[in-house]
Amino acid sequence: MDLYFVRHGKTEWNLEGKYQGGHGDSPLLPESLHDINKLAGRLQHVRIDHAYTSPLPRAKTTAETLLKDMNRNIPLTVVDGLREFDLGIMEGQKFVKLEKEMPEVIHSFRFEPSTYDYERIQGESFEQVAKRTNEAVQNIVDESASDSSALIVSHGAALVTCIQSLLGAKVADIRKNGGLSNTSLTHLQYSNGEYKLIKWNETGYLDKKLSSTDTI
């Protein structure tokens, strides 16, 4: 089974350098609609039997826009387990502000997940996010035909955690391949109970130079 993971399009808070998390949200930027259309072109001849999305508006709008641009009759299901990290008190706050106020927490979240103090920010741990997102993906796999393909639209931090843990990475190694960019495509294959990485964070079809605010 082929699994195509998409991070949502870039939002206003992404551009402003703010944490959105599992409860915060902001609209997609106008440029994101162009990027989603580019992704639709990339996927135009790829088999997709069913699409799944996080319930948060930035992901759901990305999924709906993508399927519309692909002009194919692909069913879309909202899956709560695909939502972004609960980032507690960090949500809605700027990166630079929090880097000054709690540098060790931000450093751990971005680079050393095994030391991340999620209780301090009243949010979710990497282990908790890995568990719920992996369960969501495994349910999708279990309910699908073995030769089918699924599109999964979610969020940067949640997808990095989900995909790396599906591949067997320990929490300390979750960030080993870096982050995922807005409107990026990551391809996994599932067979005989194992997940295999085919392509990580593909963005070439966007045909633009990415900035630091595009990837998390």
Image: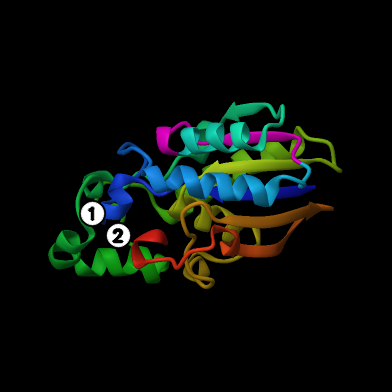
Give yes or no for contact between labels 2 and 1 (Cβ–Cβ under 8 Å).
Answer: yes
Q: 148 or 124, which lies in front? A: 148
Quadrant of the image occupied by residue 150: top right
Q: CA distance from mark 2 to mark 1?
A: 6 Å
| Residue 102, horizontal then vertical, whole percent | 18, 64
Density class for disc 1 (Cα within 10 Å; few <14, some 14-19, many ≥20) is: few
| Residue 203, horizontal then vertical, whole percent | 56, 62
- The answer to whether residue 103 is above or below residue 144 is below
> What residue do we see at 31% from left, 39% from top?
26
The answer to whether residue 17 is left or right of residue 62 is left
Disc 1 on helix, strand or loop?
A: loop
The residue to which callout 1 is attached is 120
Is residue 56 found inside the magenta-colored segment of the image? yes
Number of marks in picture? 2
The residue to which callout 2 is attached is 117
- Tell me where the magenta segment starts and ends, as one range: 48-58
> What residue do we see at 50% from left, 50% from top?
35
